[in-house]
Image (cartoon, rainbow, N blue to C red):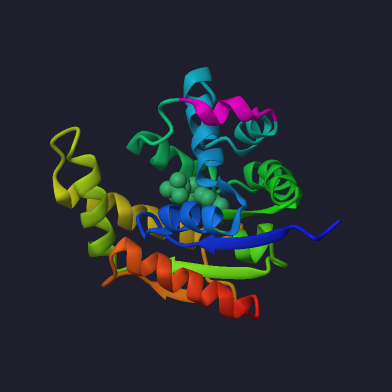
Amino acid sequence: MSVPLTIAVDGPAASGKGTISRRIAVRYGLRHLDTGLLYRAVAMLCAAEGIDTTDAEASGARAAMLHPSDLERGDLRSAEAGRGASVVAAHGTVREALLGWQRAFADRAPGAVLDGRDIGTVVLPQARAKLFVTADPDVRAARRWRELSKDRDIPYRDVLRDIEERDARDAGRADAPMTRAGDAALLDTTEMGIEAAVDEAVRLIERQLGR
Ligand code: DC
């Protein structure tokens, strides 16, 4: 049987990594896992069940019981879920509980694209191709603001502050901080539309695959 093809895509919130990953998965015929959803689900389950998200042991124990259907909750894309995810994601207990889940997903044929913060560094250090997708914080905040303000009135400065706080927490934590793997190709989407970003992502991946 052939070895599954694994592609790691990391980067901060609203960098474009989610859309790029979905499109790459279609292009290469792979499955896709948005690993942020795992952390978001843990945060929302803790909130719903009265588990203190700052309690590493309790939230780690909840993460160990995560079920695939938990990823279908309707509230995972909310700002509350994003903030909570960033808090539970700082616990080594939670990260450890989710590690096997992510690796098992990637290991099944034909392979997968995983996007997150530590895929190229911790989850799949042997991934065949790795991207680190980023963009200036104000450009990312403007993208997120355009998305959120379709449904409700929200000040741009609140969105920018949220992005900056999340970046600081994700990059500053001791356990598996968000960082570019030494062998990841850098893709800065600050001045790119999504089509150009996907084209560039494919070019970078093809190069890493030696094609
Ligand atoms: O990508 P996202 O916004 O859905 O991620 C939500 C939070 O989950 C993010 O602030 C950090 C955390 N996360 C992580 O620590 N590691 C990952 N592989 C994915 C997400």
- Furthest residue toward top: 49
- What is the x, y in percent for residue 89? 54, 46
Residue 105 magenta-highlighted: no
Residue 68 magenta-highlighted: yes
Q: Is residue 56 above or below residue 13?
A: above
Q: Quadrant of the N terminus?
A: bottom right
Q: Is residue 165 above or below residue 46?
A: below
Q: Quick one: 15 or 49, which is closer to the camera?
A: 15
- What is the x, y in percent for residue 41? 52, 33
**Does 2 sit left or right of 133 as displayed?**
right
Q: Is residue 42 above or below residue 15?
A: above
Q: What residue do we see at 53% from left, 18% from top? A: 49
Q: What residue do we see at 39% from left, 36% from top? A: 77
- What is the x, y in percent for residue 131? 52, 69
Q: Is residue 185 shown to the viewer in this render?
A: no
Q: Which residues are magenta?
A: 65-73
**Does 11 sit left or right of 208 as displayed?**
left
Locate residue 143: give its quadrant. bottom left
- What is the x, y in percent for residue 15? 37, 60
Q: Quick one: 54 or 13, which is closer to the camera?
A: 13
Q: What residue do we see at 62% from left, 70% from top? A: 129
Q: What residue do we see at 48% from left, 25% from top? A: 73
Q: Quick one: 165 or 111, which is closer to the camera?
A: 111
